């Protein structure tokens, strides 16, 4: 029985093998205006990864060592301490247009720490048109990588839910006289 007969007899929904002789070429990709590519606004196509999205290998040497001097996973208490240190570092990073740190502004939606020392931060900006959309996530990643036991840092810029003044801490609202 030939491959063609097998393909015709496959159950509905089954994957079919590609016939290499029937492949067609695809048109070259459309050029993207690189001045807009890494702004991070919803719906935009990125021509190349933004600095905050570059893959970097984890610095396992920053992990605590076992009895033989080899890097080991963080314990739960150590991971909690790293998360507290991450939040503390986030409280030192300020929005350049508002005199309040990004954590108190409510721009940070989630902080997670893996037992391998990887830190993942989901954050937003006050607006998709924010002038620091291209630089602030990279700055946050850079500062988080400075922390002890942080082997890798990734900042994910999200737009849902959309930021509002209600997300600010009470301290931030008092600082900005927003009540």
Image (tube, grey):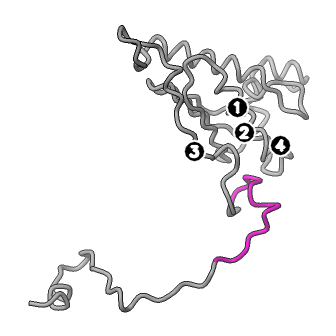
Residue tagged 1: 142
Among the 4 quarters of the image, the one containing residue 59: top right
Mark 4 or 3, closer to the camera = 3
Judge the density around disc 2: few (<14), some (14-19), many (≥20) Cα neighbours within 10 Å.
Answer: many
Q: Position of residue 175 (x, y in %)?
A: 88, 19
Are the residues flagged by discs 2 and 1 in contact, CB closer than 8 Å?
A: yes
Q: Residue at x 80, y 60 (%)?
A: 36
Residue 6: in magenta span: no
Looking at marks 1 and 3 on the same chain, the residue that comes earlier in the sequence is marked by 3
Q: Position of residue 56 (x, y in %)?
A: 57, 40
Q: Residue 55: give its label.
A: 3
Judge the density around disc 1: few (<14), some (14-19), many (≥20) Cα neighbours within 10 Å.
Answer: some
Residue 32: in magenta span: yes
Looking at marks 2 and 4 on the same chain, the residue that comes earlier in the sequence is marked by 4
Give the CA distance from mark 2 to mark 1: 6 Å
Q: Residue 132: give its label.
A: 4
Q: Position of residue 12 (x, y in %)?
A: 22, 80
Q: Is residue 1 above or below residue 61?
A: below
Among the 4 quarters of the image, the one containing residue 155: top right
Q: Give the quarter of the figure containing the N terminus.
A: bottom left
Q: Residue 138: give its label.
A: 2
Query: Tag 4, which secondary structure?
Result: loop
């Amino acid at each position: 029985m030939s491959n063609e007969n097998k393909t015709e007899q496959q159950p509905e929904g089954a994957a079919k093998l590609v016939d290499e002789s029937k492949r067609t070429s695809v048109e070259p990709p459309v050029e993207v205006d690189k001045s807009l590519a890494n702004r991070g606004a919803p719906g935009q196509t990125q021509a190349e990864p933004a600095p905050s999205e570059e893959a970097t290998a984890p610095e396992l040497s920053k992990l605590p060592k076992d009895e033989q001097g080899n890097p080991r996973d963080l314990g739960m208490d150590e991971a909690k301490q790293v998360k507290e240190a991450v939040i503390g570092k986030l409280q030192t990073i300020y929005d350049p247009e508002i005199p309040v740190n990004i954590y108190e502004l409510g721009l940070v939606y989630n902080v997670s720490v893996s037992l391998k020392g990887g830190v993942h931060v989901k954050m937003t900006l006050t607006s998709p048109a924010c002038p620091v959309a291209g630089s602030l996530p990279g700055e946050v990643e850079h500062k988080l990588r400075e922390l002890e036991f942080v082997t890798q840092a990734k900042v994910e810029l999200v737009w849902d839910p959309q930021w509002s003044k209600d997300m600010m801490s009470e301290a931030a609202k008092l600082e900005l006289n927003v009540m």
